[in-house]
Image (cartoon, rainbow, N blue to C red):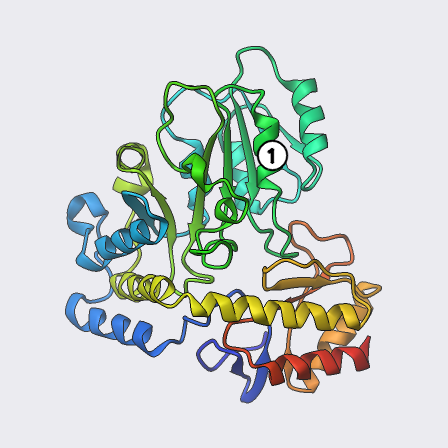
Amino acid sequence: MPVTESSLGPSVRIDGRDYLYFAGSGYLGLQSHPEVIRAACQSAQRYGIGSANSRTVFGATPPLLEVERRAAEMFGLGDAFYFASGWMGNHILTQLPGPEFGLVVVDECSHYSVIEAARLTGRPHVTFRHCDPDDLRAKLKERHRPGQRVLLLSDGVFAATGRIAPAAEFYDVLQNYPQSLLSLDDAHGVGVLGADGRGTFEHAGLWRHGPNTVGGPDQRPLLAFSATLSKAVGGYGGIIPGDREFIRRIKLRSPYSGGVSPPPTPIAAATAKALELVRAEPALRTRLWVNARLLKDGLRQAGFDVDDTPVPVVCLVAGSAENMQRIQRELFARGIAVAYMAAYSGLGPQGGLRIAVFATHTATMIGQLLDQLRRLV
């Protein structure tokens, strides 16, 4: 197993050698930002490493609360809930108090944590074809019974392929099902999509409908999302921002509030600083979009069929699994690290080459990757 021996960035040291790095999910390049690292160090010196307590039993610290304040500011909402891992977010949202869901529908290529959350609801659930609102409509027509409340679960941006869920079309389908809920795991959308980096709902033009708010007396579909702060944001832990009443209900009900330790305090301090930088420096996101376009334009010129979205992830399928493993090995031998994923939610049986570009990559670096890919494919 290769061992990474440096901080994350456009270039990393692996097993004693420096590589151009086009893997992972550090899209804005904040994991190694000097201010983020300084915040973690200062917090460790002042507070130690961990609280060894749940937040309701003396485990709440100023850095933990600062993450929630910064997240609420970034999303323009009243409060936020910060917890140990983004994996938990889907489970937390499916346990919201209110009328029970009678039917759960899930995009078939959703992340493992989404599938697990659907199963843990204990309610009947059915999958529909990937990003296909027509199949969603058909499945609901077939399986829905009068009076059932519908919960739709999906990724916002699919981790392996970078495809964006058609959230606006899903929302339109749910208009026929009173008090339904469209809930997204937006781990790869937050910080990347939308003018303010608020993710898939902002990108889809749905933010005006008020995600993560307590529903009113009308019967329109509700929106909810969770995210992780370990990817574009550059910190660690799960986040659910929302209006004050929405978050109050989550914290009151969720075992992840009172029953487990929060993220380590230095991690919280680093994450709070990273959230501050995401909001203060929108140029980071602009540079990311420029680099995503540069990468995708180059791949199309090389004959690959890739989308034209601002998501900085592409998944290349180039023949058999053996051929893609060869390409990865030869790129690595030439000083370029990309990921071959043999199996992951959303991939076919042959897997795929997952390439991620960061805001901190230069045009020259991207050009080197494209040049070598053209030689090897």
Q: Quadrant of the C terminus?
A: bottom right
Foreground residue among 377 and 345: 377
Image location of residue 224, percent across then percent down: 44, 37
Q: What SS does tag 1 mark? A: helix
Percent x, y of residue 274: 34, 65
- Residue 113, compared with residue 358, is above or below; it is above
User: Is residue 32 something that shows in the picture?
Assistant: yes
Q: Answer whether residue 259 is visible to the viewer in this image.
A: no
Looking at the image, residue 166 sits to the left or right of residue 214; the answer is right
Front-lying residue, 71 or 17: 71
- The residue sitting at 76% across, 75% down in the picture is 327
Q: Residues within 10 Å of mark 1 (few under 14, many from 20)?
A: some
Q: Amino acid at mark 1?
A: Phe
Q: Quarter of the image holding residue 289? A: bottom right
The image quarter containing residue 144 is top right
Looking at the picture, does residue 205 appear above or below residue 361? Answer: above
| Residue 285 pos. (x, y %) | 48, 65
- Horizontal arrangement in the rendering, residue 43 relative to residue 33 (left or right): left
**Which residue is the site of mark 1?**
170
Q: Position of residue 358 (x, y in %)?
A: 53, 71
Q: Quadrant of the N terminus?
A: bottom right
Residue at 62%, 56% (x, y): give it: 162
Task: State the residue in front, 227 or 88.
Answer: 227
Residue at the farthest bottom position? 17
Q: Residue at x 67, y 41 (%)?
A: 131
